[in-house]
Amino acid sequence: MSDWIVRLIEQSGYLGVAFLMFLETVFPPIPSELIMSIAGVAAGQGKLSLGWVIAAGTTGAMLGNILWYLAARALGIMRLKPIILRWGRWITMSWGDVLRAERWFAQHGTFFVFLGRMLPTVRSLVSVPAGLLKMSFRRFMLASTVGTAGWTALLAFAGFKLGENYTDIDALLGPASNAIMAVLVLGYVYRVWTHRDIDPDDVVSDAVGTDDGDRDATSL
């Protein structure tokens, strides 16, 4: 894969960097670690400007981030409610979890998106909860842009300094990505094992909906 990335960056320059980072965001198996470090190497060789490499990588990644955000926001969490209620154990989520996530996201969503953009493996997925929970586009753009720019700058600068030894970056970050994936898998298994079929918040939300319906019927 690295040979293909090298050729595309050599032939297309900044446009190739932006395109690859867009693909990486939409299709996570394409590693940003490899893309930006190779672009950093090209900058170190004088073929590209480091500043423009970072700008191109950030722009491409942000286009992918916005695409996922808008798709998730258009879908909306309410359309997923029947699926969550029926398959909650395997999704490891109850409707009560969704209500709690909305409250938590209202207070901490900006930091969550910012931090998520700088974590391997999960960085491409952060846009989905932000869109589903209808985080304001302004806050999403601010947190995503700062986090994405920091991540791309770190990788590009590492490639710039390491030169042809850019594979050391993947050797360093690869285990970190695997560790995060292992934590996610273990977390999923734990959530399935401890999932409750009845969540207190589900009962409360249903009761509130029933009361509202009774009041509406009475008023008629």
Image (cartoon, rainbow, N blue to C red):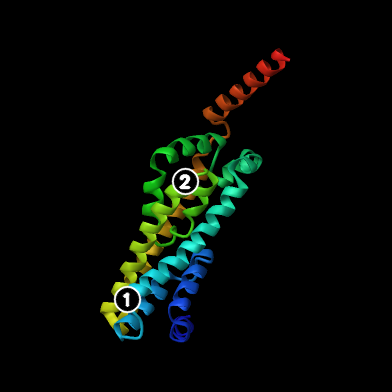
Left or right, 113 with reference to 208 = left
Identity, as a three-letter code, of the amino acid under mark 1: Leu
**Residue 219 image offset from top left, x and y in percent:** 70, 14
Quick check: can you spot residue 29? no
Residue of label 2:
190
- Secondary structure, mark 1, is helix
Is 151 above or below relative to 81?
A: below
Q: Quadrant of residue 177?
A: bottom left
N-terminal of the pair, mark 1 or mark 2, is 1
Q: Residue at x 36, y 70 (%)?
A: 54
Residue at image location 29% in from the left, 78% down from the top = 160
| Residue 134: x %, y % from top left | 52, 44
Q: Residue 50 got which mark?
A: 1
- Residue 191 visible, this angle: yes
Q: Nearer the viewer, residue 210 or 171?
A: 210
SS at mark 2 in the image: helix
How far apart marks 1 and 2 lie (CA) works out to 43 Å
Q: Residue furthest left?
A: 161
